[in-house]
Image (spheres, grey):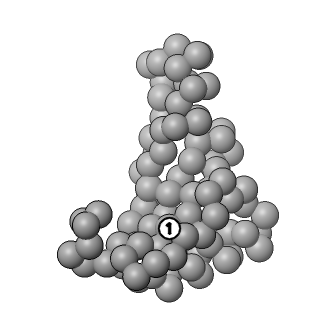
Amino acid sequence: MLPAQALHVSSCNRFIRQRARTWCHFGFRLNLADAVIGLHDDMARAGVAIVRPLYRDETLVSFRCADPDGYAIEVYWEAPGAALD
């Protein structure tokens, strides 16, 4: 099970909260590329909305799914020492 923290935008007005769903996201970094792929596959089979498809290259594996409120959650792995690090 992944550790999680609840994040929300409670102090913003309704317009900002609606706009935030289209660009704002938070994520979880996993230690293994295969863990990201496995979680993606499990979530897709369970019917979770995948809002950005699985991306894979030698330095990054990632995808985004939607939480029940429509906010994007990124799950990713990046290679140690990669430019993203």
In this rendering, position of residue 27 left or right of residue 72:
left
Name the kind of residue labelled 1 in the image: Ser
Q: Secondary structure at mark 1?
A: strand
Query: In this view of the protein, which residue sits in the foreground, 16 or 69?
Result: 16
Q: Which residue position is annotated with label 1? A: 62
> Residue 32's image quarter?
bottom left
Query: In this view of the protein, which residue sits in the foreground, 85 or 65?
Result: 85
Number of marks: 1
In this rendering, position of residue 79 left or right of residue 33:
left
As drawn, which residue projects farthest toward the left? Answer: 81
Q: Is residue 51 visible?
A: yes
In this rendering, position of residue 19 left or right of residue 59:
right
The quarter of the picture where the C terminus appears is bottom left
As drawn, which residue projects farthest toward the bottom? Answer: 34
The residue at 72%/69% (across/down) is 44
Classify 76 as above or below 81: above
The residue at 50%/85% (across/down) is 34
| Residue 35 locus on image (x, y percent) | 50, 81
Classify 11 as above or below 55: above
In this rendering, position of residue 83 left or right of residue 74:
left
The residue at 58%/35% (across/down) is 21
The residue at 29%/63% (across/down) is 84
Classify 19 as above or below 1: above
> Residue 50's image quarter?
bottom right
| Residue 59 locus on image (x, y percent) | 36, 77
Query: In this view of the protein, which residue sits in the foreground, 59 or 15?
Result: 59
Q: Is residue 3 visible?
A: no
| Residue 79 locus on image (x, y percent) | 31, 78
Query: In this view of the protein, which residue sits in the foreground, 57 or 39?
Result: 57
| Residue 26 locus on image (x, y percent) | 44, 49
Disc 1: CA contacts within 10 A as few (<14), some (14-19) or many (>=20): many
